[in-house]
Image (tube, helix red, strand yellow):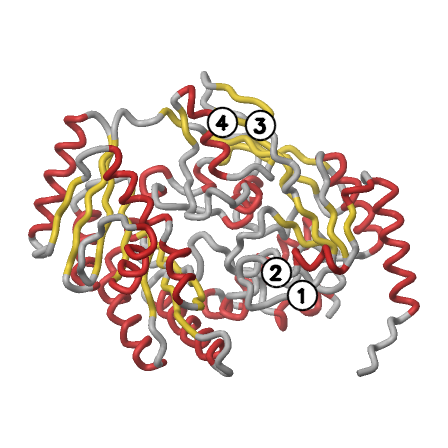
Amino acid sequence: MQMPVPNPDVLARKAAIMARLRAVLPADAVIDDPNETRAYECDALSAYRCAPLAVVLPRTTAEVAAALRVCHEEGVPVVPRGAGTSLAGGSMPSADAVVLGVARMNRVLAVDYADRVIRVETGITNLAVSAAVAEAGFFYAPDPSSQLACAIAGNIAMNSGGAHCLKYGVTTNNLLGVTLVTMAGEVVELGGAYSDAGGLDLLGLICGSEGQLGVVTEATLRILPKPEGARPVLIGFDSNEVAGACVADIIRAGVLPVAIEFMDRPCIRATEDFAHAGYPDCEALLIVEVEGSAAEIAEQLALIREIALRHAPVEFREARNEDEARRIWLGRKSAFGAMGQINDYMCLDGTIPVSALPLVLRRIGELSREAGLDVANVFHAGDGNMHPLILYNANLPGDQERCEALGAEILKLCVEVGGCLTGEHGVGIEKRDLMVVQFAPADLEAQMRVKDVFDPGWLLNAAKVFPLAVSAGRRGA
């Protein structure tokens, strides 16, 4: 087969862009070999791939600014990238884009235990932040399941959460300040090491903006003293709906556990085979963790037991020691990996009112049967952040399309009951066409005007979040 001949004009333009980038960055910071850029052609939404024009891996804020100035002057799209763990295609590139990765920017810059803050470069992993302050008895609260690998940059872009965010909040509740580099290469400081900065809350715009407004290179984060003690319990039920009703009753009673996690039978079985966490044989499982002094833990668990017994649980088991507690959480943290060993799946991310859990779990079961595709449920039940895993066969023609169609129906259901399209994974490319389900044209226009201000040329991650037809005029498409 005859290979297509590269367009000389395209090659000349790429060569000119690469020469300019290499003039302002270290030699090893610019990658344009197709064999090497292939590693950046997708993120954790691996069903979609596209090799970028090039990849730049700066080590400092000044290098980020220099790279962005070049791309801005050349009109080259830029896709910011943290660790590439996005499940919504948030860092998937286009063929004409430069991927700007911050993975080499992973230092702890300063720690202030008196004021309970840490300043880091945003390529540092989530878990490494807690590790940096653990010896002093502190931790960083947001804990996504991917915390071993995911970067703070992506956590900020997607406003990530985690199992323990029921009590401590998601990234936006623990983010105090950022160093932001605009598409034009300007370095801006927003917020700082205090609870409420003066002026407009621009920090609130940046957190959750999916890399569309600027590249965050440094972050000031809130750190917290480790609790005196913590204890998880396992509560098994004979149906998803009953487990959902128990969650709603716990929240309604005014109890504030540090976490309430949900897993259904398909996920329980896969996780148990993988992690050997000692989970009971049941249809639905709750992991509820409380913390505080011994007296506080005992009081909270007594109330939770009382509420759970009203729903006839098949098992109620308290962790008796640190090893049992560790195994309980090992199972939950391993759930996505365990499911990946047995099937291809698409992980959804929608948020609903906790009171709607029984209804939504029942409807997901009905939609699953109608579509002929199994759905495994594992999610942050305490704050209604759903993560249905739709199982499909990537090698079976048409199966991925059926999977995506079912996913769209589940996310529409989340909106219908008063929730939203995403709790922590972002919109990316996965949900951009569903934005019209949640937002009216005027709502989308207002959001796009914000991007107009920060990135008038629409060069930063421009093909994400907004439906392509809606943003076409701004993107020059």
User: Above or below — where is 139 with respect to 330?
Assistant: above
Residue under the image location 56 percent in, 39 percent down: 203
Mark 1 or 2, nearer chain start: 2
Check whether the beta carbons of the residues at disc 3 and disc 4 lie within 8 A of each other.
yes
Mark 3 or 4, nearer chain start: 3
Mark 3 or 2, nearer chain start: 2
Q: Which residue is disc 3 drawn over?
A: 108
Q: Which residue is disc 2 drawn over?
A: 42
Q: What residue type is labelled 4?
A: Ala
Mark 1 or 3, nearer chain start: 1
Residue under the image location 17 percent in, 29 percent down: 296
Residue under the image location 42 percent in, 40 percent down: 142
Mark 4 or 2, nearer chain start: 2
Q: Which residue is disc 1 drawn over?
A: 50
Residue 132 disc label: 4
Check whether the beta carbons of the residues at disc 1 and disc 3 lie within 8 A of each other.
no
How far, Cα to Cα, is label 3 from label 2?
28 Å
Q: Position of residue 22 (x, y in %)?
A: 85, 44
